Image (cartoon, rainbow, N blue to C red):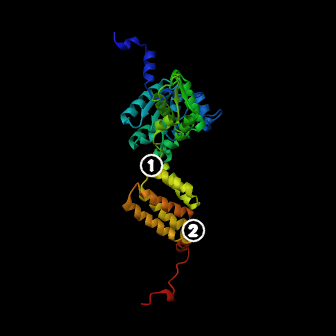
Amino acid sequence: MGMDDFFSDGEEHARVSMDEPLASRMRPRTLGEYAGQGHLLGPGNLLRRAIEADRITSLILFGPPGTGKTTLAHVIAGATKARFEKLSAVESNVGDIRRVVAQAKSRREAGLRTILFVDEIHRFNKAQQDVLLPEVESGVVRLIGATTQNPFFSINPALVSRSQLFELRPLSEEELTELMRRAIADAERGLGGRGIVLEEEAEAFLARTSDGDARKCLNALEIAALTTPAGPDGAVRVGLEAAMDSIQKKAVVYDGTGDGHYDTISAFIKSIRGGDPDAAIYWLAKMLHVGEEVRFITRRLVICASEDIGLADSNALVVAQSAAQAVEFIGLPEAQLILAHATLYLATAPKSNSATVAIGEAAREVREGRTLAVPDHLRDAH
């Protein structure tokens, strides 16, 4: 008799499950356990009503990591009478999609529905999306796609137009705190029974620095709890220092070509334009932290110097252009000092958009007005 024969199927499943990360073990199984997204899943809201009535149509869930997109798909899987199929856009190919579609057609003939969940759907290439599109349109499968990207930019517009879009938001500190307390108390799937005491400062730190990411928060809690020795009384007291060590350097959510890229540079320039040096330097620090291209930042500083400051302080253009040249031969990390210098100068400088208005009005006159000949006294003497 092998060692595995000593375990029943349920016991084996429980043993294997405890090897999973805490965030995976604590994944909500019902809407009642689901945390956050009250704007979508609050009583009476459309998505909640659709799940409870088992009337899910094709939908796309998008939002930052750790906000519950895959978890919500699992909740729907537990609530629906339809067959629930799952594909990963990273691992699946056209053959996998055709196989799922063929099975869905067979079920449909028997009066059964199929829901297809596609994780990271933005990674589907055109061929994969083209195979799936007619089946979604005809209702052979009902699609649930999950993505961290803006679906209007990253997903076939035809798929987007045939789906309802739901944006999931980062969890609040209060919601993350509740998740941690639930995990510490849960002896079946969580950390219950280990005598873990999460000190108030540590709890607040993890909730604040997880940036609304439930996965990051729970996994950091687990690392802190499992690496902290028990005290003389048998209690494992997780303090602030252990919490700080467990989360280490924050992985700031930032897509270098998507919303995070454009939203952050927009906030940066608007803060300079609004004369808020504290906000401007914060957005600069975020861009440097995630490795934003330095030339992209300096180009925007040079533009801002004329567009927003202009004749109110013409030296701003000199400072911005000097910074652009200086960072080229200084390089990071020292170049951040030059960027900070230029950012603070532009943020605190007086503002005038006279140059922007002047060239705009002149260009409009050239396009729409009467074409003027050069007066005699302005012509070349030759």
Q: Secondary structure at mark 2?
A: loop
Q: In this rendering, is residue 133 above or below 379?
A: above
Query: Residue flagged by tag 1: what amino acid is it?
Result: Val
For marks 1 and 2, the one nearer the N-term is 1
> Which x, y percent locates residue 349?
56, 66
Tag 2 residue: 353
Between 36 and 157, the one nearer to me in the picture = 36
- Disc ID at residue 232: none
Query: Where does label 1 land, which residue?
Result: 290
User: Which residue is pictured at 38% across the width and 35% down the height?
Assistant: 91
The residue nearer to you, when weighing 189 against 108, is 189
Real-space CA distance between mark 1 and mark 2, rounded to the nearest whole angstrom? 31 Å
Indicate whether 367 appears above or below 121: below
Q: Residue furthest bottom?
A: 382
Residue extending furthest toward the top: 1
Q: Is mark 1 in CB contact (under 8 Å) with mark 2?
A: no
Measured as percent of width and height from the top left, residue 253 is found at 48, 44
Near-viewer residue (243 or 43): 243
